[in-house]
Amino acid sequence: MVSDRIILHSDCNCFYAAVEMLHNPELRDVPMAVGGDPEARHGIILTANYIAKRRGVKTGMALWEARQVCRDIVIVTPNYDEYIRFSRKARKIYGDYTDLVEPYGLDESWLDITDSAHMLGTSSGMSIAREISNRIKTELGITVSVGVSWNKIFSKFGSDYKKPDAITLISRENYRDIVWRSPVSDLLYVGRRTTVKLRKYGILTIGDLAEADPEFLHSVFGKIGYVLSAFARGEDQTPVAAAGDYAPIKSVGNSTTTPRDLVTNEDVRMVIYLLSESVAARLRENHFIGDVIGISIRDNGLYSFTRQHRVKIATNISEEIAGYAWQLFLENYNWEHPIRSVGVRVSNLVPDTMPHQTDLFMSEEIREKYLKADLAVTDIRRRYGYESILRGLMYFDKALSGLDAKADDHMIHPVAYFQNGNNVLGENEK
């Protein structure tokens, strides 16, 4: 008889806020949250500490809404470089127990510790979960909640079940009493719209979903109906990916609302190059390359769109990112209105150590020169400031070229459970 796998899901509690409170102890005893620039039009709460959460502050809430429910909240702008550093430290600890560590965003990871647990003579993995929890607390100064189960979905449920600083075992003996009695919305990838749809058919709990006819679920949801049925019954067989197979985030982007409306192609080109330089620098800092380049445009008529293009060779070179982004703009905007906001994003990330197939129509020598130029510019700016070296086109408009895009509105997007780049449920659920 084949024994069950032993899967952990480790979730850093209020991760961004925890890192900020570690560096700024005065924030520990006040309601605080990490969010976008308070002056930006679309600033939202990324995470809040438990004091703020108890007063009604929620992730995704607009900054002005958070201030309405918690008037004395302290909002800190995000420091992604520091969060990525702590994320790597946590994954290094996980790596002491298994090489099967799969990130789910910066603050969460699955670990397959089947071999490690058996070597230590345990069948539940609880002792390893406790050891990891203690090490994270002692070595990093933050806490984690850990779920222990025989599959990824139930281990994720376990890490969400009790917070903060908790360990929950979801076993074959107790899952009907714990998982099946919980609301169906507590299951990974059952979000708001799916929950509403399930309720129409009297499916209110995970147990209801597990006991529903899979063919009926297929008729309502298509092939994802089978997936949800398997998830609810604890039949998920998805393997935990080996460490290094995935980047811990799926995309890095930057957007800016410009100090004046953009009215010409050259205006847009200047901003695209600024943003591309910042995105490329952030990718290199964190050792990523990506092969999907995207842009977002919003004009002063409130029209907005996003477009993306997959390239042959993954990149973190600013000249290549800007070139693809610029081409996307030229092909998709017809200047009905001036533009007020531009964004550039690189996604489908992998570690920059991944080998790639060379392109016969693309000179590796030229790519190497572009990369060396980027590295030289980054070094000069690190030493002497951002404005110490600028592209020639930046001198045509000091208002636009004065944007320090790298210090502006960076967006880092965590990986999704399904790695094919598509949202399986067709909605932004979880």
Image: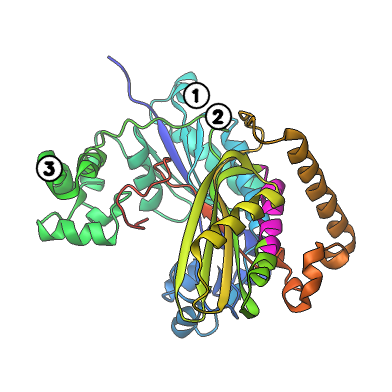
- The structure residue drawn at horizontal position 38% and vertical position 52%, both measured from the top left corner, is 160
Does residue 300 sit above or below 395 in this rendering?
below
Q: Amino acid at mark 2?
A: Tyr
What residue is drawn where x is 13% and y is 40%?
Answer: 214
User: From the image, which quarter does the C terminus lie in?
Assistant: bottom left
- Residue stretch rendered in magenta on the structure: 273-287
Q: Is disc 3 in contact with disc 1, using a CB cutoff of under 8 Å?
A: no
Q: Is residue 422 toward the left or the right of residue 398 in the image?
A: left
In depth, the one of 134 and 248 nearer the eye is: 248
State how far apart marks 2 and 3 are (Cα): 36 Å
Q: Which mark is residue 97?
A: 2
In which quadrant will I find the N terminus? Answer: top left
Q: Which mark is residue 148?
A: none
Q: Earlier in the sequence, mark 2 or mark 3?
A: 2
Residue 194 position within the rendered picture, expressed as x and y whole percent measured from the top left: 23, 57
The answer to whether residue 82 of the structure is visible from this angle is no
Q: In what element is the residue under mark 1?
A: helix
SS of the residue under disc 3: helix
Q: Does the image show residue 227?
A: yes
Nearer to the camera, 123 or 78: 78
Mark 2 and mark 1 residues within 8 Å of each other at the beta carbon: yes
Reading the image, the residue beneath label 1 is 116
- Tag 1: amino acid: Ser
